[in-house]
Image (cartoon, helix red, strand yellow):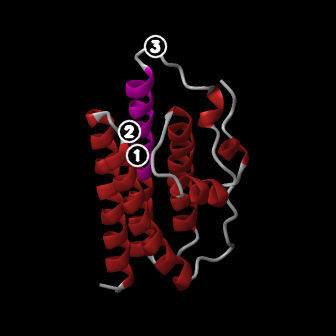
Amino acid sequence: MTKHPMHDMDFSAAAQALSALNNLGIDELGVLYRLELTAGAVYGELADRLDDRAVAEVLRRNGREEFGHAKRVRRAMVIKAGIDYVPPPYIEDRYSAALPERVTPEMLVSMVAGERAGDGDYQRWAESDRNVEVAGLLRLSGAEETKHAERLAAALGLE
């Protein structure tokens, strides 16, 4: 199996490229797995840079759930490929992600929008997947992306 070109991108570029797709095969699910692992870590790092403890806790909680999304994606990969499937080891590597020294309010608002867009991506991918179990896993993670957006928006006083 050759390595998908999205694995050689940084976090942002890989996320944008994956978002442009209407359906996900095994290789693309590997990219999504890495993105979710990276997102979980990024949320924790951003939370550590915040003075606002309530917003930081929301980011940490969302980050823990992103790790849960990664587990679901890995399950989806095995369902699609078969029980004997062993993912390539490089999917455990996190993407490089440029993080600012200081987390700005504008960045946090942008994260709310990004979470909502993530739900749309997950729902679109679920609609195109012929495997009912895989589609269900994708829908569940998508719904949680919207919860992440709502939780962060509430902590920021946006809703």
| The quarter of the displayed image where residue 49 is located | bottom right
| Residue 86 x, y percent position in the rendering | 53, 20
Q: Single out the residue that lies furthest toward the right.
A: 8
Between residues 12 and 2, which one lies in front from this camera angle?
A: 2
> Is 78 located above or below residue 40 in the figure?
above
Please report whichever mark, 3 or 2, sits nearer to the chain's N-terminal start: 2
Using the image as rendered, state which of residue 127 and residue 56 is in the foreground.
127
**Can I make out residue 51 in this image?**
no
Where residue 123 appears, as percent x and y from the top left, is 34, 54
Tell me which numbered mark, 3 or 1, is placed earlier along the sequence. Answer: 1
User: In terms of secondary structure, where does tag 1 sit?
Assistant: helix
Determine the CA span between mark 3 and mark 2.
Answer: 17 Å
Label 1 belongs to which residue? 69
Residue under the point 66% across and 32% down: 90
The part of the image, by quadrant, that contains residue 158 is bottom left
Residue ID for mark 2: 72
Q: Picture quarter containing residue 128?
A: top left
Q: Is residue 112 magenta?
A: no
Q: Which residue is mark 3?
A: 84
